[in-house]
Image: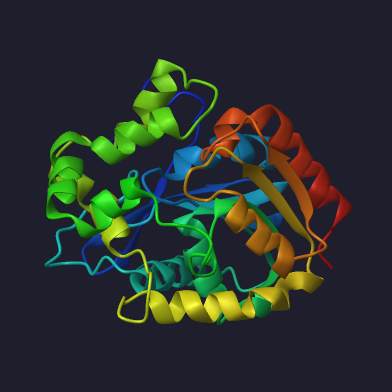
Amino acid sequence: MTRSDKTFPGYPFTPRRFEVRPGIAMSYLDEGPRDGDVVVMLHGNPSWSYYWRNVVSGLSDRHRCIVPDHVGMGLSDKPGDDRYEYTLQSRVDDVATLLEHLGITGPITLAVHDWGGMIGFGWALSHAAQVKRLVITNTAAFPLPASKPMPWQIAFGRDWKFGALVIRAFNAFSSGASFVGVEKKMPRDVRRAYVAPYDSWDNRISTVRFMQDIPLGPDDKAWPLLEAAGKRLPEFADRPAFIGWGLKDFVFDRHFLDGFSKALPNAEVHAFEDAGHYVLEDKADVLVPAIRRFLDANPIG
């Protein structure tokens, strides 16, 4: 699939490709001046770098914006299970490999959403000194709070074979998220852009594998990484942090916002009663200039 402004409105960028593993290419954006402060933006499931498009447009005149599509997502290759292990550790390793390839060894701003939080803070376990600022939107970097029940919609895809079948056969997760993930109805062409990469059974593999990898306990592969990230999250409290949160998110709701606020008590918090999981869709007009002001007010170095 190739990019076009008609297919992906508001995404006037030229994705690049990098062989992140032998025979597997990762698509990513690298927008903005090479000598600008680096902002690494990590998406989740079932979205892709398209989620960050308005932030890239709002920052790339001064900041270098690095935005990968995780393997199996967006415009990246979508290998089968025989060629790629769809786990949190693989995602963390991919981000590390991409940034090493780009020579990003200095300070960065880490921006995360959904699974991007677990991936980003998983990467930060061994790169904490590089992370100088945080931009956090509806995500997790710690285990499911004890007071938060697992939503049935997630359990449907994670634990039930029938749920996984429905997701892969009918694109139920990506299509559904484009409706229930917002409070302000997405324009039809924007919704189509979100779901376009997942247009076949084979191309939906990662939307299912991400759900099946959700760590809920010690028996899950991703648990050690998530547990470690959660324990170390308070170590980032001395760094400037910006939190933009849609309170109508049925997964990453106030329980998760409270977790971040407790770990990062000095964070600048923008929480919206009338925004959902895709908070940058509902509130781009507020959040993009606010993020820019936050970066301006907290320079690196």
Vertical side of 134 occupied by 215: above or below: below
Q: Which image quadrant for residue 54?
A: top right
State the image coordinates of residue 94 (x, y, percent, origin top left). 39, 68
State the image coordinates of residue 135 (x, y, percent, origin top left). 67, 54
- Residue 169 falls left or right of residue 299: left
Question: Is residue 128 visible to the viewer in this orientation of the structure?
Answer: yes
75 or 273: which is nearer to us?
Answer: 273
Q: Could you tell me which residue is drawn at 16 percent across and 67 percent down? A: 83
State the image coordinates of residue 85 (x, y, percent, origin top left). 23, 69
Q: How is this picture coloured?
A: rainbow
State the image coordinates of residue 182 (x, y, percent, origin top left). 50, 30
Q: Could you tell me which residue is drawn at 40 percent across and 77 percent down? A: 223
Q: Which image quadrant for residue 75?
A: top left
- Residue 23 falls left or right of residue 259: left
Question: Is residue 77 visible to the viewer in this orientation of the structure?
Answer: no
Task: Identify the image quadrant of the N terminus.
Answer: top left
Vertical side of 250 occupied by 232: above or below: below
Number of residue marks: 0
Task: Identify the image quadrant of the C terminus.
Answer: bottom right
Q: Could you tell me which residue is drawn at 51 percent across and 67 percent down? A: 146
Q: Which image quadrant for residue 124?
A: bottom right
Q: Could you tell me which residue is drawn at 25 percent across and 61 percent down? A: 24
98 or 157: which is nearer to us?
Answer: 157
- Residue 201 falls left or right of residue 255: left
Vertical side of 18 occupied by 244: above or below: above
- Residue 59 falls left or right of residue 42: right
